[in-house]
Amino acid sequence: MIEYFILSASSFSGDIDNLFLVITLIIGFWFILVFGALVYFTLKFRRKDGVKAEYITGEKHSETKWTHYPHYAVIAMDVVIIAANIIVWVNIKQTLPPKDNLIRVIGQQWSWSFVDAGPDGVLDTADDITTVNDLHVKVDETYHFELQARDVIHNFSVPVFRLRQDALPGRTIKGWFKPTNTGSFDIQCAEMCGYGHGIMGGAITVHTKESYDETIVQIKNGTYESHYQKRMGTKTPLPSNTSHTEGHNSFAVLLASIF
Amino acid sequence: MSEAYAHPNYVKIWFWLVVLLLISVAGPMLEIPALTIITAFGIAVIKAFLVAANFMHLKFEKQIISFLLILALCLLGVFFFGVAPDIMMTDGDQWIDCIADKSCVEQRL
Amino acid sequence: MSMHGPIATHRSATGVPTGRLGTWWLLASEIFIFGGLIACFILFKLNGTPGFEDASLTSVTAGAVNTFVLLTSSLSIVLAHAAIEKGDQNKSFTYIWYTIGAGLVFLGIKTYEYTGKILHGHTITENLFWSFYYTMTGLHALHVIGGMVIMALISFDIRKGYNYQRVELIGIYWHFVDLIWIFLFPLLYIANF
Amino acid sequence: MSQAAAAVETGIHAEHHEDLNFLHKYILPLDHKIIAMQYIFTGMIMAIIGGYFAYAFRMQLAFPGELVPGYGLVGPGEYNMLVTNHGTIMIFWVAMPVLIAGFGNYLIPLMIGCDDMVFPRINRLSYQIFLVSALVLILSFFVKGGGFGGAWTAYPPLSSVAEYNLTDWGSSLWVLAVALEFISFLLGGINFVTTAMNARAPGMKMMDIPIAVWFIVIAVILFMASVGPLIAGAVMLFMDQRIGTTFFLPSGGGDPLLWEHLFWFFGHPEVYVVLLPTLGIVADIITVFSRKKLFGYKTVLYTAFATGGLSFVVWAHHQFIAGIDPRMANIFVVTTVLISIPLAEMMFSYIATLYGGSIELKTPMLWALSFLAAFLIGGVTGIYLGASALDVYFHDSYFVLAHFHYTFFPITIIGMFAALTFWFPKMFGRMMNETLGKIHFWGTFIPFNCIFLPLFFLGLAGQHRRIYNYQHFPDLATQELQNIRIFATVSLVVMLLFQLVFVYNFFVSMFKGEKAPDNPWRANTLEWSTSSPPPHGNFKKLPTVYRGAYEYSTPGREEDFWPQNVAPE
């Protein structure tokens, strides 16, 4: 169901969408059942003059079966949900498939830095490619990332990949993704990280092999134009009044200046 | 209070507490770490039990109070073991403590 | 038993007097506050966080003397309770003030320790061990001070002949403060490996 | 209780009937009913502040960068401050004081048939600390740098280092206010639990206690057992901020993840702390207005115990992708999904209570039924978020936001209105206007759904939380998504306007409403057996209890209710 709202562009995003569908079907069934019962009882058992309500304690077996049997069914369906979930979770977060490329993602207030290990697949060597707010990856290749944060907690989030992972200062967290669609998409920071949290974004561009090589050449020549800035520029320009005044003449700040 | 129960001999309990204290201080002098743990924390537990049972009259109190306290300690245990895998180890599944292996961004960037 | 306050206070459906039940609930929630701190301390210690070897710098003698002082004060407050049960106001009053005196000795030794440590440069911000050391002992010392103030108030009440049951309540609280110290002592002073 | 004990009670009772002056009656009261009013009114004032904050930041989301009428410009820092304090206020200064402290104070002594709380002075002290905490929080909005803006979860290092959060004193005062509030409710909680355990009316057995009292007490126990580590954590955080320790700073050997654990070990039981009182209140209301015995009293009670117990072992589902060990996540998935089992059973029991009833849709009943309906949505969407693999996508998205507003809004706002409209005659001795009550109900419930249902779809589209302006995210800056945001904002404004109906109805009815009889709803519980409003000391003669709280439509009786204190013939 999620894919109707947003593109599904990584190898595991389909699994997550399917898990969502499975859970939706199960809880949709329960929701309709319970909600239906609630509405039906409310409408059916309205007060009528001279009709007394029934006296049901709900402690005899003949009565409790009406809540207990659905209850057993809930347990059964819980097991299905847990099983389905753990399969997907183990696949996404607990296992690292063999890597084709390695990148390091560093979050800081309020931008993302990306270090691509380059052809040799080792970080901190001469062929590293460093970009800011702009990540370039090749389609259909498995990427491992090492996630770090320089100051506060950030969250590396790529909605089209269905990928989110917190970056904790003091730790290196490993993860992976494998893009399946080309295009240019949003990177978000999905954990409150301070004043500029609302502008902490980036662009991830999934390339075919040819356009990737072309972009790398551009980066090395210095003739490169950031995809992030291009996206920000072509879509909607930043509203000038927010970016300049930053709320200095507002009510609360005014009051604060009195104190 | 008006309820009557036999008082334990408070001075005797105090005497045993002081003896236990001396043992726990003497324990580390043997310089055997395993023994130190036993003398330090094992004796702390015994002392705590003695104080709670006799001085705090837990021996004579309704059982619900003891139940309450044990439940509190169990919940603390849940907290400890829920947190332990993340905080107590320098590397876990899919993450490493980069302070420990000096690979942190602070050091390099 | 004094007869003021609402009727509710004098009911006892559980069989435990209301004041005592309330005190036990207070202690149960205190267990979580100190327990949370101690749990965090142990987690960092077992993690091998740098700085925890400084436990060897704390003075075992001072800690042991303080433990002894607190254990003795526990004895005197429980004797105060035993005295007031027999209706002996003056004896109980004296024992309560012995307890307060022991609390003062405890705080005095604590101050001496703090001064020595700070003069040697072991301030609260030096490393995590000292942060925990000052936080835990400081919070404990606050409990000691609070207990002493309440004890002093109660001691004058019982001389005027009311609120006898409160001697037992402050006693239970004081033993709890003692219990916390019984665990802080090995954690901060003895276990230095 | 024996005859002798009862005689002793009459002896004590004579003591506190003196007339009190205004100061001692309303400003420094010992009477649990007045303290309850203080909590409820303080909570409602804080709700107005929280609602105003919501209005300001929703307007910014719908019309980014434009002046918000009645507020001004909402910049990024202010937006953070508004969302942070909206969350903090609504949970700690609205839900907790109104539902637990307010109605707990009002209902526990009345429902168990005693004259006051067992520790009236501690009760007053806990309100005073609470008031101070509210004032400290409000003060934090006005200090240099503005209010704290690091989300209500206050994850360090953002919350602990002034260079990162840019609100040096704002964040310290925030932590201080929250810690004071916890202390206040700890003291209050001790009082509630002890009262309910010890001060029950003669004859009231464990299984005769109304569900509302049971649930408030369970909630308080959950609170007391979960908040301790966070109080320790708050002390550590405050020292990080002000003294410069490094408990949560990795550069000094600390660990930010520790705070997350401390916070959520409290934070998840906290959800049930506010949920249970409302569930209890709703149980009392639906039985009264359907004239039915509660279906499976014991089952409902045991499910509440199970929920409370389970709530302690699920906290890490807030941290699935926060860098915790992924293997631990599997354990927490199991416990989280398991919590649906007792809550589903409870829901079934409530709905089974309606079966065969004689339902009268008075305003409180409308609120109670709408609570069940809305909470059902909140509950089932929780299953998605309990599944760790879906959390990989939904973490910190609007799906989470919509989910917890579908739980917290019914709990806090709908539950509060249900309780207020139901006990209003008892509190003030006058009836509320039914027509205005129903207008207010529909004017709140329909816009509520219009606000939060669309947000689920924004979440599915990948919109993340706490962003003041989505124009910085091209995938989210489309016109379709913006239209949804505008729709939600307009619904919010409509809902806020309808609250004026309630305010009018509340205050006019308080002074000019029709005089209420002692038992206007023909209910069983003890508070309806005394006069409206109850005098200081609650009962002229303290009641004795003969039966459970839910004997409605008992066969063989002419009346369809059978109050707990009426002696059998």
Image (spheres, coloured by chain):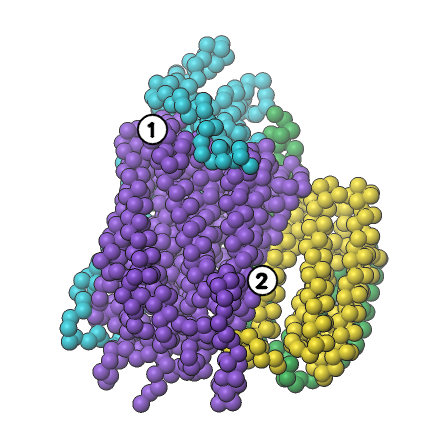
Chain colours: A cyan, B green, C yellow, D purple
Q: Viewer-proximal residue, D567 or D298?
A: D567
Which residue is pictured at 26% across the width and 57% down the height?
A: D437
Please provide percent x and percent y for residue C58. Answer: 80, 51
Q: Is residue D208 above or below residue D505?
A: below
Q: How far apart are marks 2 and 1 (CA)?
A: 48 Å
Circle on res. C29: 2
Disc 1 is placed on an element classified as loop
Asked if residue D377 lies left or right of residue D183, the reply is left
Please provide percent x and percent y for residue C121. Answer: 80, 41
Asked if residue D153 lies left or right of residue A13, the reply is right
Please provide percent x and percent y for residue C64. Answer: 81, 60
Q: Viewer-proximal residue, D510 or D344?
A: D510
Looking at the rendered structure, the kind of residue marked 2 is Ser
Looking at the rendered structure, the kind of residue marked 1 is Ala
Residue beneath label 1, please?
D477
State which chain disc 1 sits on: D
Same chain, marks 2 and 1?
no
Seen as rendered, the residue at the extreme left is A49
Which residue is pictured at 67% across the width and 70% down the height?
A: C170
State which chain disc 2 sits on: C
Q: Viewer-proximal residue, D558 or A231?
A: D558
